[in-house]
Amino acid sequence: MVVPNSPKTLSAKSRKTWRELLAAHEFADHERIVLERALEWFDRSDAAAAQATSADGAERARLEKLALDAATAGLRFWRSLKWPSPVGVRRPGRPSGAEWSRARREAAERLARLA
């Protein structure tokens, strides 16, 4: 599979991430746009955090807040990509049916009898 070139607007770190992810996963066109936006927001977060280390007082607080907001925006884009779960990893939450362990199944039966 040919990996599309990374966007020029991304940092070196984000371009490396772009190449690695596109080599490991198949992305539709719209998903590549979402990935690009996520990486751009992560770059903005990193830049603001780096500037905050040399700032003082209110300016430092403003830049730290900007870094946090940019990271949150990046994570929202990232989460919308619906990454596949690794093989063998159980989804979070209560398992259904025969996937329950014997101890959990017995505890659930005891609780049901109490109700």
Image (cartoon, grey):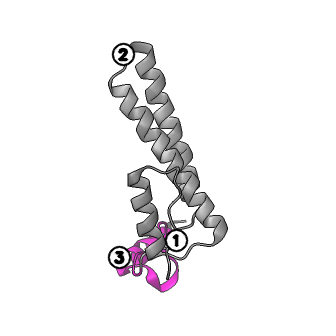
| Label 2 close to label 3 by CB (< 8 Å) | no
Determine which residue is flagged by label 1.
Answer: 112
Mark with earlier residue (2, 1): 2
Residue type at tag 1: Ala
The tag on residue 79 is none
Answer with the quarter of the image where residue 21 lies.
bottom left
| Label 1 close to label 3 by CB (< 8 Å) | no
Which residue occupies the foreground of this view, 9 or 72? Answer: 9
Residue at position x 44%, y 33% from top? 48
The tag on residue 103 is 3
Disc 1 crowd, CA 10 A, few/some/many (<14, 14-19, 20+)? few
Q: CA distance from mark 2 to mark 1?
A: 59 Å
Determine which residue is flagged by label 2.
Answer: 56
Residue type at tag 3: Ala
Disc 3 crowd, CA 10 A, few/some/many (<14, 14-19, 20+)? few
* Magenta stretch, residue numbers: 87-112
